[in-house]
Amino acid sequence: MFKWLRNYLRGVVWPIIVAMIALIVISILAVHAAEQADPTNPSVRGSTVKQVKWVFISLAAFFAVTAVPYKRIGRAAYPLFAATLVMLGILAAASKFEYSSLLIPAIRGSHRWINLGFGLFQPSEIAKLTFIILLAWYLRYGDNYRRFRGLIIPFALTFIPLGLVLVQPDLGTSLLFLPTLFFMLFMAGAKIRHLLVVVAVAAVAVFFPVPRNVTGLSRAALADRESLAYWSGSIGEKEYVISAAPLVLMKPHQLRRIEGWLRQGDEEVAMDEGFQLQQSMIILGTGGLWGQKAPEDKNLYFRWLPDDHTDFIYAVIGGQWGFLGCVGVMLIYVAIFFCGAEIAGMTNDPFGRLLVVGVLGLLLAQILINVGMTMGLTPITGMTLPMISYGGSSMLVNCLAMGLMVNVAQRRPILLAPKPFEYGRKRPEDSTNYGPLFEWNRKR
């Protein structure tokens, strides 16, 4: 037992653990500050205690996932992914048929959570991780994705969970799948010109004009559709709106968020659709270099910011600890990325390397979207800040992701073989029996 513990501690990547603990401490302090600002708000009351409870659960899960060799986790990639799709499918069906119960509650019109009794669990969060595991397992030894038609399966594996998450609806989480996919494909060796073609086709699809019959909609709903439309008017006895393809599928509150982002300088919009963004930017601006000194000032500003302890926790950090606090959080993330990049660079096993790359891509996308929407650089999409925002599912999944990186670092295989994903290089004459990667190259 002591020998196993000694070997375990010797292989642990301590900088990642220290950075993770630092972010968790900041999370508890920031959530507590948001709770103290508005203690009578039922959506915020008790959030600090709940966050601490999930922290202990998440840390236990972190150490548990580091104790299981990551290749064993890879062998279970397909069952894990299938189980996730089942949960997402149940929630998508509940949202489609507007079904809600104690087990599947409807919160703010969305069916994203499953009630576990001691807390709410969000399957779309774990879907991000099982997606990375599955994709890394699929890409680990193949090279068909270096041909354009070989991208069909990776994209199909991506759009299945993405579509189910969108139905719930959960636009924020759905935005993370494609950046993670592109990051992993690029690092695995997919050709850049193929990925650029996909991006170009996607850009055309995003702005492609699609008509929608809006006859019979209320005045408010019609105003939401017309605000971002290319054209609106009557054709015969029916009213039509022509807008970009994604806007046709979006809910009214999502359209209002985009309008609030595009019209930040409009005072009328700032008091309605753009109120949350305006308050976030005010708190960041008044935080100054060191943060607001008077507690009553913090309480005043934090109380006016909806979802300050979840999606807009970065604004709380800016108001509480100022510009230096925001920079400090970013530096901790940078330290995690440097450690993750070193782990990926020192790992010759393709599956292990792709696991780390996928986790880093997921974290990068989350951070950029969350910080961007807090500062008004991107639309508000309901994105949590990794390991800081309030939320048990988010904390659990991000700690599991950190655990996967540490897991790969602990079990870096020593192989006398070429580095993975290096194509076109000649195989040494005497390398036939040196390992599976050489055997793979020989068969190619």
Image (tube, rainbow, N blue to C red):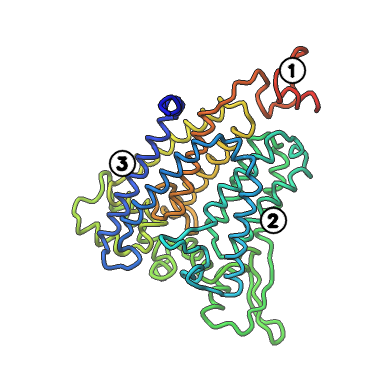
| Image quadrant in which you'd find residue 210 | bottom right
- Say which mark, if any, is on residue 324: 3
Local SS, label 3: helix
Seen as rendered, the residue at the extreme top is 430
| Image quadrant in which you'd find residue 124 | bottom right
Find residue 202 and report its horizontal and vertical position in percent: 68, 53
Tell which of 39 and 213 is nearer to you: 39
Mark nearest the camera among 2 and 1 is 1
Q: Is residue 137 left or right of residue 271?
A: right
- Determine crowd level at label 2: few under 14, some 14-19, many 20+ residues with C-alpha closer than 10 A: few
* Amino acid tagged 2: Val
Find residue 163 and report its horizontal and vertical position in percent: 64, 60
- Determine crowd level at label 3: few under 14, some 14-19, many 20+ residues with C-alpha closer than 10 A: some
Indicate whether 237 appears above or below 4.
below
Q: Which residue is mark 1?
A: 433
Where does the N terminus fall, quadrant-wise?
Answer: top left
Indicate whether 187 appears above or below 161.
above
Q: Which residue is mark 2?
A: 204
* Amino acid tagged 1: Asn
Local SS, label 2: helix
Indicate whether 255 appears above or below 131.
below
Local SS, label 1: loop
Where does the C terminus fall, quadrant-wise?
Answer: top right
CA–CA distance in space, label 1 to label 3: 55 Å
